[in-house]
């Protein structure tokens, strides 16, 4: 099985790093699925969408990502996120409250978190 190195980094440090077989993300240009040996690219991430990383061990991890960039080279995918949190750590009640706020940035972050845990906003 062919794999690629994936790094998910936010301003305060690395959130996740490891070998993966697939990455799914939503960019300003549309949805993208990245497999090993994908053509090089750089894309801007949308502000309110999850990212899924399928590890080589069969585990699928979902992260709520609040903006940033996706960089793909032959064997490395780097996700530079303005903010990110793994789905397992999301406080759904807080995200639902934030989705109802008047702050558009807060609403976008809440939508990403709710989508990461499979809840509609």
Image (cartoon, rainbow, N blue to C red):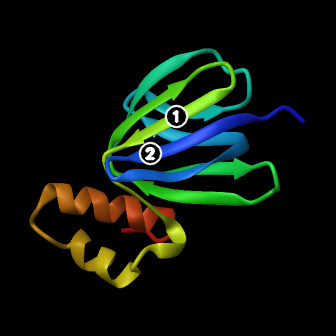
Residue 28 seen in the figure? yes
Quadrant of residue 57 within the rendered picture: bottom right
Q: Residue 109 lies in what quarter of the image?
A: bottom left
Residue 54 place in picture, x, y as percent: 71, 50
Residue 6 percent across, percent down from the top left: 61, 39
Characterize the local packing of mark 2: few (<14), some (14-19) or many (20 or more) Cα atoms within 10 angstroms: some
As drawn, 39 above or below 14:
above
Question: What residue do we see at 45% from left, 21% from top?
Answer: 42
Front-most of 70 and 5?
A: 5
Q: Is residue 3 left or right of residue 76?
A: right
As drawn, the label of residue 9 is 2
Q: Position of residue 110 (x, y in %)?
A: 31, 65
Is the Cβ of the residue at disc 2 closer than 8 Å to that at disc 1? Answer: yes
Circle number at residue 78: 1
Residue 49 seen in the figure:
no
- The single residue placed furthest to the right in the displayed view is 1
Q: Tell me the quarter of the picture where residue 19 sits.
A: top right
């Amino acid at each position: 099985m062919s794999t690629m190195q994936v790094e998910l980094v936010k301003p305060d440090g690395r959130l996740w790093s490891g070998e993966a077989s697939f990455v799914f993300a939503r960019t300003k240009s549309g949805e993208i699925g990245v497999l090993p040996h994908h053509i090089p690219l750089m894309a801007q991430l949308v502000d309110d969408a999850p990212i899924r990383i399928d590890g080589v061990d069969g585990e699928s991890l979902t992260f709520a990502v609040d903006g940033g960039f996706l960089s793909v080279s032959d064997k490395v995918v780097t996700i530079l996120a303005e903010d990110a949190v793994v789905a397992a750590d999301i406080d759904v009640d807080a995200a639902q409250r934030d989705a109802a706020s008047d702050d558009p940035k807060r609403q976008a972050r809440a939508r990403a978190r709710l989508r990461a845990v499979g809840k509609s906003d």
